[in-house]
Amino acid sequence: MNSIAAAVPATPKMQNLQRLKTRRKFWLKAHLWLGLSLGLFLAVIGLTGSVLVFWHEIDAVLNPTLYRNTTPPNTQKSLDEILDAAKHAAPPGWASTWTQIPEEANGNYVFGFYYPNISPPPEQAQSFMLGVNPYTAEVTHKRVFYHGSNPLKHSFVGFFFKLHYALLLGETGGTLVGILGVLFLISALSGLILWWPLTGKWRRVLTIKPRASIERFNHDLHQTAGFYSLIVLLAVLVSGIYFNLPDQFRWLVERVSPLTPEAEAQTPTATASITLAAALQQARLTYPGGVPRNYDFSGGDSGLFSACFDDVPELRRYVLASRCLVFNRADGKLLQIRDAVHGSGGDLFMQWQWPLHSGKAFGWTGRILVFISGLICPLLFMTGTIRWLQKRRAKKSVARSR
């Protein structure tokens, strides 16, 4: 009978299945060694990412006077007065700042100043934050966000940010995490290859077998957790690669779709006669709507000023309903509009990266999904390691029994 069976030629389907199994062995090894060698880093980055989904809420609880004031709501000071108050209160030498607009009546304007090129930086702050009362233009709170040399002196959420995107290793760490992100992406895709049922038994790969052995439960948990979180994990990994390897990411996107060059500051042809507040008000006549989110501008009187808005009514049909207006600081000239209807498909793809990475693209649903995906990272590392140890023990047991 064996000789007769051996003489039966393999069907094309059987040959194809054998080829797939051979390729699967390669991806199994790749997935195994990527997981064992890099899984701990993935666990740390995932856990810190889960914390940072709610970084603003956490920071507001830890630093209430930075974000809130007790002044009864009344007429707010002008934008220029608020900006001037913050600039005069910040240690000198800053290169740029971002400004978070208050969402509540008792909220402050929160500024973050960066000192990337000064050593040692003023007050030992690589990044310095302060809050400004919009009704009095008074500074209510100051604190170091990123310490210039000691990671243990970062603010609480600042420590998590540095650990998340740079493993506390500075610029080198940022590049390293970007490279790790590429390897994590390969690992996730190889996991999908291993998950795919070659024999069509879909129920087995989509569920956890009830009343299974510990070994089988661990295997099913690893498999199903990886599959059901895959879409969110891929979005977070791709966007994370963008933030850590921006030049390389932009180059890759431009192979598919052209990107609009970043706006550059211009020297005005005449003496500036308009304030930033007036320039912004004038631009808003053409581009109205939306809730103010943040302002960004460079140090000195030159450079750029950008104002970003969320929930712009005319953009809601594009899901990404945000718009940023970019001005020339020296004369208030509007240089660029960044939103879903201006620019190329590549520009729109780039605009999606932060909303996807933070989960803000889909409100609380998106944030919770990103939070869960971060928690799944250490789960995948632990269940994958346990699976490897189980197989290792099994092989040793077989070898001893011979």
Image (cartoon, rainbow, N blue to C red):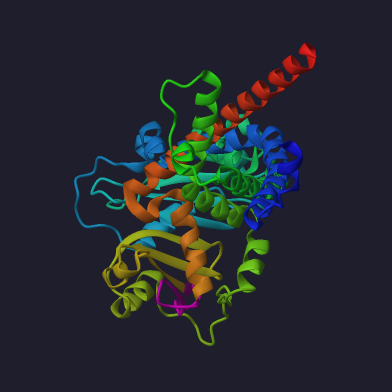
Q: Is residue 14 left or right of residue 355?
A: right
Can residue 301 be found in the magenta stretch? Answer: no
Q: Is residue 79 left or right of residue 49?
A: left
The magenta span reads 327-344
What percent of the width, then of the height, locates residue 49? 51, 40
Q: Nearer the viewer, residue 311 or 275?
A: 311
Whether residue 283 is visible: yes
Q: In the displayed structure, would residue 165 be above or below residue 212?
A: below
Q: Nearer the viewer, residue 55 or 379?
A: 379
Q: Residue furthest top?
A: 401
Quadrant that contains the N terminus: top right
- Quadrant assignment, res 72: top left
**Residue at image point 61% right, 24% down:** 386
Q: Residue furthest bottom?
A: 269
**Residue at image point 32% right, 73% down:** 281
**Residue at image point 67% right, 22% down:** 389
Which SS type dominates the magenta stretch?
loop
